[in-house]
Amino acid sequence: LMATAAVFCFGATAASAQTIGFSQIGSESGWRAAETTVTQQEAERRGIDLRFSDAQQRQENQIAAIRSFIAQGVDGILVAPVVATGWDSVLEEAAEAEIPVVLLDRMVDSSPELYLTAVGSDLVHEGRVAGEWLVEAVAGEECRVVELQGTTGSSPAIDRKQGFEEGIASADNIEIVRSQTGDFTRTRGKEVMESFLQAENGGADICALYAHNDDMAVGAIQAIKEAGLKPGEDILVVSIDAVPDIFQALAAGEANATVELTPNMAGPAFDALEAYLADGTMPEKFIQTESKLYTQEDDPQAEYEARKDLGY
Ligand code: AHR
C-alpha cells in the first residue's frame, strides 16, 4: 500500500512547507511532555506546519484526530499509539488516502505495510537491561520485586515486562511478587506503591521496585519515604526513561538505575517523511534509538543539568 502511495506523493510538496499531523497520546509523563516539545521544536526548525492533537490517553481520540488529518489532506501523519491493537481500519484509511504514517515510540499490532516506518527503542531490550542490572546489584541475595507496569495494552508495558522477566530469568534468587499498572503516571505510581507497601509488611518484604517509567518511580519513591523507608537503600529502584527528576533522585541516592529513552523521535521521523515525500525513498521499517543505562556512578547531577531545560 505504501508503495502505491509513493507514486502519488513524489515531489508533491517539495517546493512548499509540508503539513504534518501529530496525534500525541497525552501528557502522562515528563518524558511525554519532552517528546511533544522536541517534536514541535523540530517541526519549527524545519519549517513544517505541524497540526498537533492531544488524545488525553484515549485511542478513540487518536483515531478521530487521524481521520481529521486525512480529511485536511496533510502530507504525513505522526502517531504515538496509546495501545498496540485496534489501528487497522484507520491506518488503511490513511493508506488509501496516500498519506504516509510514521509511528513514534510505541508499536502497533497492524501489518507493517500500513505505515511507512516506526521510530523507537527496542522496548524488550530496555526491560532486559533493567533486569540484568538488578541481577548484578543484588549479587545472589534473595530479592522480592514489585513491578509498576505502564498503560495496560501499550507496547512499552507489554515489552518492558517481558524484557525484565528475561533479564532476571537466570536468577532464582529474584522473584516478582506483585505487579500492577500505574498507567505511566506519577500519581498512580505513588498510589499503587502505597498498596504494595501495605501488602508487603510495610515494605520490609520488598527488596526492589521495577517501574516501567521514571515518573511512576518518582511517585513510588515518595510513597517509600512516607512509609519511613529509604528508597535506593531499603528498596532498590530501577526504571526507564532518564528524565531529569530521576537524575535528581539518583544524585540523592533515592534511585539506583534508569534506562534512557530519547524524546527526540521526531528528528528521524521527519527525515524519513521528508525523503519519502521528496522522491519516494523508503526508510527502514524500524528506526531504532539508543537505550543507555545510567546509575549513581554516572554523575547524575551532570546528567540532570544537561536535560533540565529540554522541555521535560
Ligand atoms: O511510550 C514511551 C513511554 O510512554 C515512556 O516511557 C513513558 O514515560 C511514556 O508515558
Image (cartoon, grey):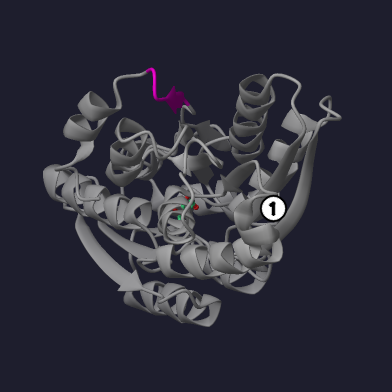
Q: Name the residue under label 1.
A: 158
Tell me: 244 left or right of 141: left
Q: Is residue 64 above or below residue 44?
A: below
Judge left or right: residue 116 versus residue 251: right
For the N terminus, give its image quadrant. bottom right
Nearer the observer, 27 or 229: 229
When asked about the image quadrant of residue 208, the answer is top right
- In x, y percent, where is residue 141? 74, 26
Q: Can residue 83 be seen in this view?
A: no
Residue 217: image x %, image y %? Answer: 47, 51
Instruction: Assess whether residue 294 is covered by the magenta stretch.
Output: yes
Left or right relative to 174: residue 45: left
- Asked if 96 appears above or below 251 in the picture, the reply is below
**Which residue is rendered at x = 77% and y = 32% of the image?**
142
Q: Residues in magenta? A: 292-297
Q: Can residue 65 be seen in this view?
A: yes
Q: Which of 26 and 143 is in front in this view?
A: 143
What type is the residue that disc 1 sits on?
A: Ile
Residue drawn 36% across the image and 42% down it: 246
Residue 219 screen position, x and y as percent: 42, 59
Q: Residues within 10 Å of mark 1 (few under 14, many from 20)?
A: many
Q: Residue at x 35, y 19 (%)?
A: 298
Give the image location of residue 131, x and y in percent: 66, 32
Say which element carries label 1.
helix
Q: In this view, does 295 lie above or below 196?
A: above
Q: Looking at this view, is 67 or 106 the one in front?
A: 106
